[in-house]
Image: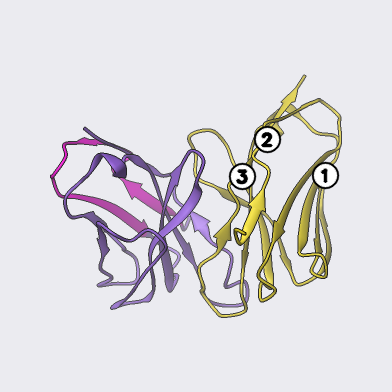
Amino acid sequence: DAEITQSPRHKITETGRQVTLACHQTWNHNNMFWYRQDLGHGLRLIHYSYGVQDTNKGEVSDGYSVSRSNTEDLPLTLESAASSQTSVYFCASSPGTDRRETQYFGPGTRLLVL
Amino acid sequence: QKEVEQDPGPLSVPEGAIVSLNCTYSNSAFQYFMWYRQYSRKGPELLMYTYSSGNKEDGRFTAQVDKSSKYISLFIRDSQPSDSATYLCAMGGNQAGTALIFGKGTTLSVSS
């Protein structure tokens, strides 16, 4: 079955380290998104992509970067991890067709920055 | 005023109760309205999807959109303990693939 996966599911890192979170979808969706979810803030958009080689900044993009070299993957990189980036990170994708606004979410990655 | 407002709760009801969850929004360009359900330590999953105004029913769930009032609702009939979760409203404009704006979520607990 088609799906969206994230890895790792849990990650502990230290301040200042570079961290990359993986997102892989097998639906062949054009659109992919990264969110972070924090208590009191809900889901906030970090970066998104409408297709290969396309990336866009979201509401809370500072300190994060993404690249889209193929349809299936949108890795999220924390250039220099900070304690404020401790959060749960969700990747999502949407097809960009009739129900184009429906987004399908991965299981999440819990990141702790010490 | 935030684009999407949602009461975080928590909301506690007995099994069998009718539950009403609501969101208000300020952007009149929103055309797509969704409700996601998120169980603890899981990703959000799409529950209901509505385009423009009107009602949509799916089993025990009914979604309503009132664009004139900028108000959306999710009703759960005959609530079950398995409905205990956080419910997120989400909405977006008419442009393909545009990012959704999410409410902060309402936590619902249904006791048996």
Query: Bounds of the magenta span?
Result: A3-24
Q: Are marks 3 and 2 on the same chain?
A: yes
Q: How far separated are the C-alphas under marks 3 and 2?
A: 8 Å
Q: Amino acid at mark 3?
A: Gly
Check if residue B70 falls in the magenta segment: no
- Which residue is at the front of the view, A4 or B47? B47
Q: Earlier in the sequence, mark 3 or mark 2?
A: 2
Q: Are marks 1 and 3 on the same chain?
A: yes
Q: Residues within 10 Å of mark 2 (few under 14, many from 20)?
A: few
Q: Is residue B22 left or right of residue B85?
A: right
Q: Earlier in the sequence, mark 1 or mark 3?
A: 1
Name the magenta segment's main secondary structure: strand
State the residue position of label 1: B60
In yellow, which chain? Answer: B
Q: Amino acid at mark 1?
A: Arg
> How many numbered marks have been drawn onto this rendered protein structure?
3
Question: Residue at the location (62% across, 59% down)?
Answer: B1
Any mark on residue B9, and which? Answer: 2
| Disc 2 versus disc 1: nearer the observer | 2
Question: Residue at the location (81% across, 25% down)?
Answer: B15
Q: Position of residue A67 (x, y in %)?
A: 25, 68
The chain letter for the residue carrying disc 1 is: B
Q: Position of residue B37 (x, y in %)?
A: 62, 45
Any mark on residue B105, and which? Answer: 3
Q: Colour of chain A?
A: purple
Q: Position of residue A80 (x, y in %)?
A: 16, 50
